[in-house]
């Protein structure tokens, strides 16, 4: 096993979301599985307990590997690798029977103020899952106003994107924006005070900046393509998403890759190759039941989709074809 150390989580560990529906949808679990979003290891452990012979666990965050004391009892059945799931086929280096992706940040990352993901905790404006490359502060203080507005609009579906981008650029001229709480205050001042039960006004902006800092949509698009190359015929992929932009990408990818688009519109130009590379296992997205939402409110917006690889050779798709949002000029209002 690579990179494993005995580090115990200091806080409430991450509660795995939709784990039981996922295990039910991919049963019987056997052979070699890859968990591309290891986090606190909830899925990896679930797969091993359900019958996987071995699990390769990938996370871009070194902290996930430092916290992987849980893997020790499994010995050689677990191989841990630091990296991004966009390269999962290369990192695995062998054909896989199954892949799981549980997108977004872990509770572990959110809870650590110093990682800068949460507007609820004062910390440095960081947000880098991999702890490398440009940070949220670099983006917020360096990007031009139009780019900031486009990011907020496209990745956060923030309708006040232009107003917020202008406020950010004005604020940073006197003093660079270096903390989560200062950014949250700047955003909050641009929006109406939330009514009881509504989310914090900075929620959409923080989501957008986090997606941009971690290039989350291109990671997802490349990860799905890498999964197509890595899975054996009959192998399964299960993806859990947390917001509509992510779910739309996964849904469109599975639709296109399962040949479902071929006859969707008889007036559309014929696609060159409609051979199904996947079959849908879940016809519609699976969400949490009431008991799971009550036990773990974070699961509320989660959606699970599962597909099975066919024997057709992999085909590279253009990410724009399956709805990967591009930064557009729509935020200029
Ligand atoms: C929601 S958590 C996964 C939790 C995990 N399923 C569990 O039960 O503990 C997502 C994890 O995926 C990691 N991650 C997100 N995007 C990634 C990527 N592109 N490549 C590798 N890891 C990624 C994050 O660092 C985080 O640790």
Image (cartoon, rainbow, N blue to C red):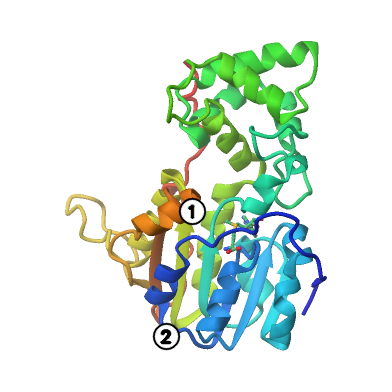
Are the residues tagged 1 and 2 within 8 Å (C-beta)? no
Q: Is residue 253 visible?
A: no
Q: Nearer the viewer, mark 1 or mark 2?
A: 1
> Mark 1 near ligand 1 (CB under 8 Å)?
no
Local secondary structure at mark 1: loop
79 is higher (above) or lower (below) than 318: below
The answer to which of 240 and 225 lies nearer the viewer is: 240
245 over 93 or under it: above or below: above
Q: Is residue 275 left or right of residue 153?
A: left
Q: Would you identify the image quadrant in which residue 48 lies? A: bottom right
Read off the residue under disc 1.
296
Q: Nearer the viewer, residue 40 or 317?
A: 40
Q: Residue at x 44, y 76 (%)?
A: 236
* Mark 1 nearby-residue class (10 Å; few <14, some 14–19, many ≥20): some
Does label 1 or label 2 sit earlier along the sequence?
2
Q: Residue at x 50, y 34 (%)?
A: 156
Q: Is residue 329 left or right of residue 76?
A: left
Residue 75: x and y in percent read 73, 86
10 Å neighbourhood of mark 2: few (<14), some, or many (≥20)? Answer: few
Residue located at (50% from left, 63% from top): 224
Q: Which mark is residue 28?
A: 2
Question: Which SS class for mark 2?
Answer: loop
Q: Is residue 172 above or below residue 8?
A: above
Residue 157: percent from the left, percent from the top? 46, 32
- Ligand 1 shows up in the quarter that is bottom right
Q: For the N terminus, give its image quadrant.
A: bottom right
Q: Position of residue 240 (x, y in %)?
A: 47, 59
Q: Position of residue 129 (x, y in %)?
A: 70, 50
Of 46 and 303, nearer the camera is 46
In this image, 321 relative to 70: left or right?
A: left
Distance of label 1 from label 2 (alpha carbons): 26 Å
């Amino acid at each position: 096993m690579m990179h494993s150390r005995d580090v115990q989580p200091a806080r409430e560990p991450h509660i795995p979301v939709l784990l039981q529906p996922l295990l039910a949808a991919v049963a019987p679990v056997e052979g070699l599985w890859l968990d591309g979003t290891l986090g606190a290891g909830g899925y990896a452990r679930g797969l091993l307990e359900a019958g996987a012979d071995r699990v390769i666990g990938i996370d871009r965050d070194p902290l996930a590997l430092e916290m992987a004391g849980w893997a020790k009892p499994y010995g050689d059945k677990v191989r841990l690798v630091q990296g991004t799931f966009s390269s999962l086929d290369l990192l695995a280096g062998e054909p896989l029977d199954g892949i799981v992706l549980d997108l977004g940040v872990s509770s572990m990352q959110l809870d650590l103020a110093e990682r800068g993901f949460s507007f609820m905790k004062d910390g440095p404006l960081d947000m880098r899952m991999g702890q490398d490359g440009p940070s949220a502060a670099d983006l917020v203080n360096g990007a031009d106003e139009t780019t900031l507005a486009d990011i907020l609009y496209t990745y956060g579906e923030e309708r006040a994107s232009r107003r917020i981008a202008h406020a950010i650029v004005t604020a940073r001229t006197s003093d660079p924006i270096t903390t989560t709480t200062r950014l949250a205050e700047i955003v909050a001042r641009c929006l109406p005070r939330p009514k009881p039960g509504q989310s914090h006004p900075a929620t959409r902006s923080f989501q957008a900046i986090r997606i941009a800092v971690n290039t989350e949509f291109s990671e997802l698009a490349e990860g799905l393509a890498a999964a197509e190359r890595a899975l054996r015929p009959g192998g399964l992929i299960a993806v859990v998403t947390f917001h509509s932009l992510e779910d739309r990408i996964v849904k469109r990818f599975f639709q296109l890759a399962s040949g479902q688009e071929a006859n969707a519109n008889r007036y559309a130009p014929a696609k060159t190759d409609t051979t199904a590379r996947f079959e849908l296992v879940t016809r519609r997205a699976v969400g949490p039941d009431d008991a799971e939402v009550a036990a773990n409110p974070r699961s509320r917006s989660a959606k699970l989709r599962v597909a099975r690889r066919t024997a057709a050779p992999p085909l590279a798709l253009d990410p724009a074809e399956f709805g990967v949002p591009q930064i557009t000029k729509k935020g200029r209002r």
